[in-house]
Image (cartoon, grey):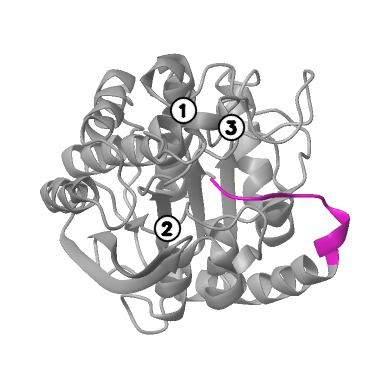
């Protein structure tokens, strides 16, 4: 996961994003009006399966671009999305990051109901960080992290949701995008060193003039006692959906995770999608200014980001809320 940014510096930029997104959202609604959907029951999210999805990723090892584990993970994730979606497209591109130049990277897109105009975008990043610059042990700061939460958790939840959609059906279009090259930016440098996979896709979408009604980004969604506030870019671009999702979480008794506060803004994959595709985006991400901590949690960009910090209750909350959001959107009740 990337840089935590204070609110004040980016208000003007966000406002520009918000105006663009509002226009596109209304256009999308008009296009979707003629499509018929069947009211479908919200399927039961299996947090055990989602946990196993995270564990399988971690078992590959350090998964930053340029490693064999990264290559092997791409094959695995492509195969998994092939099982659950109607079409899979991979996007290959080159990236420079940290001290690496011209490294191969790949975005993976799983498409459900490609003919439907009414669409929702669900995304996460799968790469892990090459260095642990925040680790309290200086000797470990130049070593890669396993990224169980930062990379693994969002993908693990989305794979389980993709399985549910396959087995239960849905009448809208759903695009699962697993972004590469998100997490190896310069923590002391420019924001454009982060989120290279989403930037590439947003500038070169898998479908020309790609549109979705809105999208949800999952990042850092698996740790114990996670706090998901209403991130500032998300509020500016998709306030209507943010409020609906947090209200839905409240009805589902998950207010200990989905908390009504504003933690500030973060440079994450949703920013590129808002900027270049003008799609309203919600970033569900564990960052806080509550309960004695500010910004990211203690394990962020350290060697502690392993399976020990993954909590099945957190995964359950996120998975159930996002699944309900997806099917309520299908049913016209969101």
Q: Which of marks 2 and 1 is in front?
A: 1
The CA span between labels 3 and 1 is: 34 Å
| Residue in view at x 40 percent, y 72 percent | 201
Q: Residue at x 65, y 76 (%)?
A: 23
Residue occupied by mark 1: 303
Residue 117 showing in the rendered view: no
Badge 1 marks a residue whose secondary structure is loop
In the rendered structure, which segment of residues is drawn in magenta? 1-11
Q: Residue furthest right?
A: 8
In the displayed structure image, the side of residue 291 where residue 270 appears, left or right:
left
Q: Is residue 126 visible?
A: yes
Counting residues from the N terminus, which is met first, the one under dot 2 or under dot 1?
A: 2
Query: Is 74 positioned to the left or the right of 191 in the image?
Result: left
Q: Disc 3 or 1, which lies upstream in sequence?
A: 3
Task: Mark 3 vs mark 1: give the one in front.
Answer: 1
Please tell me which residue lies in front, 70 or 163.
70
Disc 2 secondary structure class:
strand
Judging by the rendered image, the residue that carries numbered circle 3 is 248
């Amino acid at each position: 996961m990337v840089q935590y940014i204070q609110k004040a510096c980016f208000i003007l930029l966000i406002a520009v994003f918000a105006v663009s997104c509002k226009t596109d959202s209304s256009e999308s609604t008009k296009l979707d009006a003629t499509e018929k959907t069947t009211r479908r029951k919200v399927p039961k999210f299996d947090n055990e399966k989602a946990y196993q999805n995270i564990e399988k990723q971690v078992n590959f090892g350090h998964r930053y671009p340029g490693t064999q584990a990264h290559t092997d993970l791409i094959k695995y994730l492509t195969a998994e999305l092939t099982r659950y979606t109607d079409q899979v497209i991979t996007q290959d591109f080159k990236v420079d990051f940290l001290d690496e130049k011209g490294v191969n990277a790949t975005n993976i897109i799983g498409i459900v109901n490609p003919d439907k105009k009414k669409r929702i975008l669900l995304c996460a990043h799968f790469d892990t960080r090459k260095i642990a610059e925040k680790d309290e042990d200086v000797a470990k700061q130049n070593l890669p992290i396993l990224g169980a939460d930062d990379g693994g958790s969002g993908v693990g939840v989305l794979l389980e949701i993709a399985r549910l959609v396959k087995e239960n059906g849905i009448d809208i279009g759903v695009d699962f995008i697993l972004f590469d090259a998100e997490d190896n930016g310069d923590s002391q440098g420019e924001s454009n060193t982060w989120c290279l996979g989403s930037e590439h896709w947003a500038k070169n979408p898998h479908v020309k003039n790609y549109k979705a009604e809105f999208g949800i980004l999952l990042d850092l969604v698996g740790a114990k006692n996670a706090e998901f506030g209403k991130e500032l870019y998300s509020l500016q671009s998709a306030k209507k959906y943010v409020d609906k999702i947090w209200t839905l979480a409240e009805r589902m008794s998950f207010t200990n995770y989905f908390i009504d506060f504003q933690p500030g803004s973060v440079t994450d994959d949703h920013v590129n999608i808002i900027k270049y595709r003008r799609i309203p985006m919600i970033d569900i991400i564990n960052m806080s200014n509550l309960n004695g901590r500010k910004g990211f949690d203690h394990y962020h960009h350290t060697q502690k980001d392993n399976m020990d910090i993954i909590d099945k209750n957190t995964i359950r909350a996120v998975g159930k809320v996002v699944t309900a959001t997806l099917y309520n959107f299908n049913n016209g009740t969101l």
